[in-house]
Image (cartoon, grey):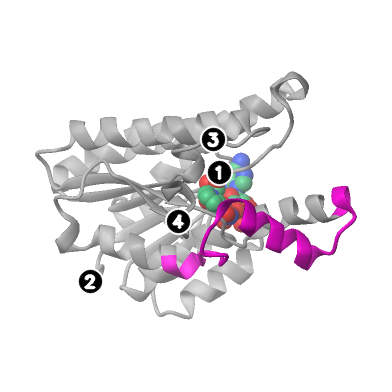
Amino acid sequence: MLNGKTALVTGSTSGIGLGIARSLARQGARIVLNGFGDVEAARAEVAALGVEVDYHGADMSKPAEIADMMAFAAARFGRVDVLVNNAGIQHVAPIEEFDPARWDAVIAINLSSAFHTTRLAIPAMRQADWGRIINIASTHGLVASPFKSAYVAAKHAIVGLTKVVALETATTGITCNAICPGWVLTPLVARQIEARSHDEGISVQQAERELLEEKQPSLAFTTPQELGELAVFLCGPASKNVRGVAWNVDGGWVAR
Ligand code: NAD
């Protein structure tokens, strides 16, 4: 379905980004990876699916590096047809103790990076009259939790950005949508489970169970592969009138 198309997935050396890159590669898309994890392992996993793959190490908190990555992708493969804004970090602290530098980093990486990649990707998408922009938001783009002020602010904002871009491209072949996962067992969440286990003096398994019981009624983690399959749907012809949605995949988290 995506033969001849190029997908750039930010923060795709692990977790959800890598899962989405794998799903898009299975549909034949060339992949541009990005992120600070195990680059060679991610590259090998995607290449094993039989598609061309390259990597750019741009730091998503740095607009000049983002511009360089977008230029690199265009030079390497022609243009970016599918843009997945996925890179993200978390920082957990009460607001009065929240380190301002961490606030700036969360806003830059989880929100502003998507503004920069999107503004740079859209001209070529308009020329082709085709494009898919998928923003990985979160249930925290729809509802809040305490101690995650920067993350919740950034994720609510990226849902808003998604709607604006969807409206500005509504009469074109470009769509922009957000995916809002609940808990997905990736390195980002594993760190929160470890912190909980440490703080409460409980086992990692118990901390995992408590985390799910607190928020996710299905008591099961969403997987990167499930999110990858939703991204495939959002790239497909049946979704061409799906515009500006924030689609939660959260085991019922925001239903209650
Ligand atoms: P992860 O830590 O496994 O992956 C994050 C990726 O972003 C990694 O590749 C990392 O190297 C990259 N990254 C971090 N800082 C970067 C920077 N400055 N520049 C470039 N790359 C950078 O985490 P994940 O859980 O897969 O998270 C991916 C996205 O999904 C994030 O936006 C996160 O907020 C969102 N999300 C995750 C969950 C969850 O439960 N795991 C739930 C909802 C939303």
**Mark 1 to mark 2: distance in Å?**
28 Å
The reply to whether callout 1 and callout 2 are in contact (CB within 8 Å) is: no
Q: Is residue 91 above or below residue 149?
A: below
- The answer to the question of whether label 2 and label 3 lie on touching residues, with beta carbons closer than 8 A, is no
Residue identifier under label 2: 1
- Camera-nearest residue between 53 and 137: 137
Tell me the crowding category of disc 3: few under 14, some 14 to 19, or many 20 or more residues within 10 angstroms, Cα based: some
Q: Which comes before the other along the chain, label 1 or label 2?
A: 2
Q: In this view of the protein, which residue sits in the foreground, 204 or 6?
A: 204
Whole-percent x and y of residue 232? 31, 65
Of pointers 4 and 3, the one earlier in the residue sequence: 3
Rendered location of residue 164, percent (x, y): 27, 30
Q: Which amino acid, by three-letter code, is at mark 4?
A: Gly
**Which mark, residue 58?**
1
Circle 3 sits on which residue?
144
Residue 9, picture quadrant:
bottom left
Q: Amino acid at mark 2?
A: Met
- Which circle, 4 or 3, is nearer the viewer? 4
Q: Earlier in the sequence, mark 4 or mark 2?
A: 2
| Magenta residues, dominant SS class | helix
Q: Which residue is identified by label 4?
A: 252
How far apart marks 4 and 2 lie (CA) works out to: 30 Å
Residue at 56 percent of width and 60 percent of height: 184
Task: Tell me the element at label 3.
Answer: loop
Is residue 225 one of those drawn in magenta? Answer: yes
User: Looking at numbered disc 3 in the image, what kind of residue is underneath it?
Assistant: Ala
Compared across the picture, whether 132 is left or right of 197 comes to: left
Look at 43% across and 68% down and name the residue there.
Answer: 226
- Where does the magenta region start and end? 198-226
Mark 1: which amino acid? Ala
